[in-house]
Image (tube, rainbow, N blue to C red):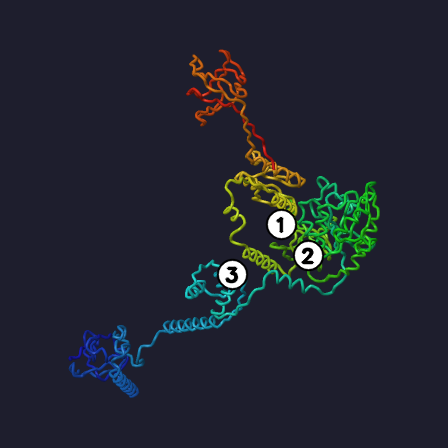
Amino acid sequence: MENKKTKLTISGNPKKSFTKFDSQRTQGKKTVVIDKQATRSSNKGKFNKPLGSKSNINFKKSVVPKPNLTPKVQTSASDFERRKLAEQRATKRLKGDTDNKDKKNKAVPKKRELKLTVSRALSDEIETRERSLASVKRARQKELKNANKEEDKNNQKSIKRDVNIPEAITVRELANRMAEQSSNVIKFLFGMGVTVTINQTLAADTAEYLVKEFGHNPIREEKAEEIIQKIKAARTENLKNRPPIVTVMGHVDHGKTSVLDVLRSANVVSGEFGGITQHIGAYQINSQSNKLTFIDTPGHAAFTEMRARGSKLTDIVVLVVAADDGVKPQTVESIKHAKAANVPIVVAINKCDLPEADPQKIKNQLLEYELIAEDLSGDTLMVEISAKTKLNLDKLVEAIILQAEILDLKTDFESKATGIVLESKIDIGRGPVATIIVTTGALKKGDFFVSGLRWGKVRAIINDKGQNIDQALPSTPVEILGINGAAKSGDDFIVLDNEKEAKNLSENRAQESMDDKNPLTFATQDSAFSDSSTEELNLIIKSDVHGSSEAIKNAVSQIKHDEVKPKIILSDIGMVTETDVTLAKASNAVLIAFNVKPSKEAKKLAENEKIKISSYNIIYEVLDYIKQKMSGLLTPDVKETISGTAQILEIFKVSGAGKVAGSKVTEGEISSTSDVRIIRDGAIIFTGKVGTLFREKNQVKQVSNGQECGITVKDYMDFQKNDTIEAFSVTSTERTI
């Protein structure tokens, strides 16, 4: 194959000296003839080095006639040796390339390498093309990035996390705790034959298995109640004597609150509507250098849960029994609550100043319930008192102190506080307010706490005298502000270390309460199995405190009837709002306000929508009103009385009156205002009213038995002989529950 020659024209004198080239003058320029060893198409495999290297260029003397001119630049010995070494190295590389023709990366030269430039043709210092600094930098950055990715990947795989597992957890939450993608968890479960969604709830056992499979350490979370019990158990150091908590119980109107009034010198009865205690009141008094905490409970039958709550909290129960009235149902109930709570009972026989008082009769009646007085060789302390004349009240206090000394009540004063919620309400301007009694530790302003499903920060502490205090010691009843909602009466109260702990514990409790609920609620059960013929009275009840709301709900649930039943769609505390009025209209409900007033906006809306807001202050009035409204839904009793019958003998046509039935009264009497039926062959064919009653062509008001008459019936003229006309009257009687 002929060698392809390339002709390059170089301006000026060459800086390098060459031995194998022909030069000729062309208009002051030198022409160099270069012989390329191979073409791009014919010798692909032999090119391993850029053509710019000197080893790839042969300068042939035979191609161009040798000129007579001698180059001005002489070749030095060092340049010659360098070129010789380069040619030797190029020869070795070419031989190696021939042996490795199967390697594509060496056999196919790049287009850029095939370009022959003047600098490459004349350069003898660089054997191969060097990479640019930018290219080297990019390559190093790429290698470093890949290395970092691999390192991160390895690190992630190697991290073993402690994963807390509650009783129930969603797939999303479990993936987040493991720092895994939710899709990977779902794929894993799908591979096990379990199809789930990202919001599917997993049981604790399943979640634990997944955590192990993903290489993490599962930790079963303790239930919120278990955590609280551990916290309470740890707070039993530095025990000191504390004041006793005394609950006053008994039948309604036996003088419980009056006794407390005298002891604390305050008139509480006047503040209760109808003279009936409808709230739990807590007070602390100083007597004989001793502090005593009293809890006053309602005696009305509707407040059973309040009395039960008071008996659980208390150390000593003071049972007030009126000497002129004796043992009553709520008295017996109070005894049962006290015995169930396993607390000692001190009996206060009140109203001993009355002439009809018989304390001995009371003692004999209490024997039936295993309460034996000391003078009857028993162990129950009984004191005959009179709240009105203050008779023996000091002896009553002494008996309580004596009983407290026997119990030897001690608790920790230094730890974080725990307590029980007695009552809760929503106060205008102050928000949710909870009445609590501290049982352990010291409650301070700024403490974070949890109570049932609620939590908060103590922003203010108010004692029973209405004074702001900085801390509350054990057995102290106080009101606290700062809870995030209305607490439930009877819930525990526990102070925690920080806000996060309080919030998490509250959320865990809420989650556990939701998990424990049956998917089929009572409401859905009622709707599934209810009789469609049963009428329902929808009720919306707003109360001042949680205890009253609870009592009304329980009392309403006791109202039973076959044809109508009450249904409470909302029972809450606080004033009546616009939302309540709107709900009452939408559900056709009766709106009841107990010890609360409607807001201005709600009152105006109720007037516009013609919704009645029934306000009451006494609980039995509420129950009477509900029974009255339920009675209105009952179908009245209808009674029918037959007043007389007549037989049609002949039919006449009278101008202006139409057809007249000439009849004879066979039984009773028929009046002109009677309701009548037309009976033919034993079947009722028409029911209507008498139009006109004739007697010998004269209109009359009444026709008696045995008399003949003419009868017209409104909207009916199709009389026939031997038809019977039956006169009757209907009376309806309203039914009550």
Tell me the SS state at disc 1. Answer: loop
CA gap between label 1 and label 2 equals 16 Å
Q: Which residue is mark 1?
A: 486
Q: Residue furthest top?
A: 697
Tell me the SS state at disc 2. Answer: strand
- Report the front residue among 140 and 664: 664
- Report the front residue among 604 and 721: 721
Three-letter code for the amino acid on which mark 2 is drawn: Gly
- Asked if residue 175 shows in the view, the reply is yes
Is 692 placed above or below 516 here? above
Report which quarter residue 37 is drawn in.
Answer: bottom left
Q: Which residue is mark 3?
A: 169
Three-letter code for the amino acid on which mark 3 is drawn: Ile
Three-letter code for the amino acid on which mark 1 is drawn: Ala
Mark 3 or mark 2: name the one nearer the start of the chain.
Answer: 3
- Asked if residue 429 shows in the view, the reply is no
> Which quadrant, please, contains the C terminus?
top right
Q: Is residue 487 left or right of residue 132?
A: right
Tell me the SS state at disc 3. Answer: strand
Q: Which residue is mark 2?
A: 419
Residue 111 point in image, percent of width and height = 26, 72
| Number of marks | 3
Mark 1 or mark 3: name the one nearer the start of the chain.
Answer: 3
Is the C-beta separation of discs 1 and 3 under 8 Å? Answer: no
Q: Nearer the viewer, mark 1 or mark 3?
A: 3
Within-10-Å neighbours for mark 2: few <14, some 14–19, many 20+: many
